[in-house]
Image (cartoon, rainbow, N blue to C red):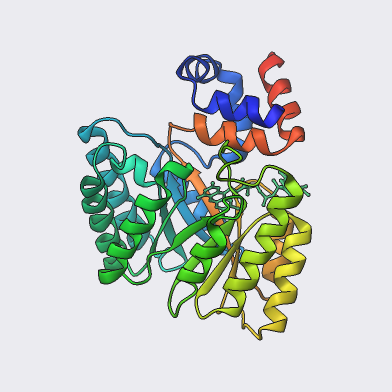
Amino acid sequence: MLRSVFLAAAGSARMERLVSSVPVTKGIVQRFVAGEGVDDALRASRVLADDGLAVSLDHLGEDTLTEEQATATRDHYLALLGRLKGAGLTPAAEVSLKLSAVGQKLDDRLAFDHASAICAAAAEAGTTVTLDAEDHTTTDSTLEILADLRKDYPGTGAVLQAYLRRTEGDCRDLATAGSRVRLCKGAYAEPESVAYQSALDVDKAYVRCLNILMSGEGYPMVATHDPRLVAIAEDRARWFDRRSDEFEFQMLYGVRPEEQARLAAAGHTVRVYVPFGDQWYGYLMRRLAERPANVAFFGKALTSKK
Ligand SMILES: Cc1cc2nc3c(=O)[nH]c(=O)nc-3n(C[C@H](O)[C@H](O)[C@H](O)COP(=O)(O)OP(=O)(O)OC[C@H]3O[C@@H](n4cnc5c(N)ncnc54)[C@H](O)[C@@H]3O)c2cc1C
C-alpha cells in the first residue's frame, strides 16, 4: 500500500514541487544521494574506492522532454567521465545511464546517439556504461539500443528486472560471453499483466534469473540488499565455480554499507551505485517505497525543526 503511494508520488509534479521546496528533506536526501555536483560525486567515489569498493555513478534525471535537456544530460556525462579519468578513478568507477534522460521518450535515435557518445567517452576513460532499466514500456527499446551499442562497445551493461514476467527469457538471451547484466528486483509500479505482484513471486523469479545468469557465460551483477538473495548468489557462485572477477555484487549508496564492507572483505567485487545531481526527487521516492523504515526517517525529517 505505502509502496504504491510513494511510487505514484514519484510521477507527480505537484508532490515534487512540494517535497523539493522543503529544505529539511535534505537530511534524508543526503543519506541516499552523494550530493548535487560532480565534486560531491568524486568525493564519495574516492571514499568508496579507498575502502576497496567499485562504483557506478548516476547523474540523476529522467524523462527528459526536450532535445536541449537531452543534450545537456549527455554533456554532463561527458564532463563526468573526463573528471573520473583525471582523478584516476577509472576503471573502478563506471557510469549508469537512464536512456529516458537522453531523450528516449522523444526519439530512440536521439537516445542512441547520445548514449553512443557517452559510451565512446567511457571507452576513452577506460571504463564502461550500464543502461538502467526503467518502466516496462521502455524495455524493448532499451534492449534494442543496448544491442546496437554493444556492436561498438561490447562492455555496455544491461539491467534486467526480475519482477517482469519476460525477464527469464531476456536473461537467456543476454547470458552470453562478455555480456554484463545487472539483475535487480525492479523499482517501478507495474501492472499484473507484465509483472509479478507479490514479494515471494518476485524473489522466486529473481532466483530463477540468477540461476540462468550464473550458469551462463556472461558477467552477472547481482544488485540486491536482500540477505537471502545475497546468500543464494554466494552459493551459486561457489556452485558454478565463479571467481571474484567473474561476477559482482551491487548495492545502492547509503543502503547496508556494513554488508557492502563484509562482502568486499570476503573477497567479492562490490560496486556501489552512487546517484548525484539536483534531480533527486523520483529516485528518493523509489527508495522510500522500498522500505517502511525509510518512510519513518523521511517523516521525521519533514517534521523536524532543524
Ligand atoms: C545497484 C543497483 C542498481 C539498481 N538499478 C535499478 C534499475 O536500473 N532499475 C530498477 O527498476 N531498479 C533498480 N534497482 C532497484 C531495485 O530494483 C530494487 O528496487 C531495490 O534494490 C530494492 O530491492 P532489494 O533487492 O534490495 O530488496 P528489498 O525487497 O527492497 O529488500 C529486501 C531486504 O533487504 C534488506 N534491506 C533493504 N533495504 C535496506 C536498508 N535500507 N537497510 C537495511 N536493510 C535493507 C532488508 O532485509 C529487506 O527486507 C537497483 C538496485 C541496485 C542495488
Q: Quadrant of the N terminus?
A: top right
| Left or right of residue 20, residue 140 in this image | left
Q: Is residue 42 visible?
A: no
| Left or right of residue 143, residue 209 in this image | right
Q: Is residue 198 above or below residue 294?
A: below
- Nearer the observer, 176 or 233: 176
Residue in the image at 48% along x and 41% along y: 135
Which quarter of the picture shows residue 131?
bottom left
Q: Where is residue 252 drawn, in percent x and y?
A: 60, 50
Q: Is residue 228 above or below residue 302?
A: below
Q: Is residue 145 above or below residue 154?
A: above
Query: Residue extending furthest front?
Result: 193
Q: Quadrant of the C terminus?
A: top right
| Left or right of residue 255, residue 154 in this image | left
Which quarter of the picture shows residue 304?
top right
Q: Where is residue 91 drawn, in percent x and y?
A: 42, 69
Residue in the image at 52% along x and 42% along y: 34
Query: Residue extending furthest bottom?
Result: 241
Q: Where is residue 59 drawn, in percent x and y?
A: 41, 44
- Nearer the observer, 236 or 272: 236
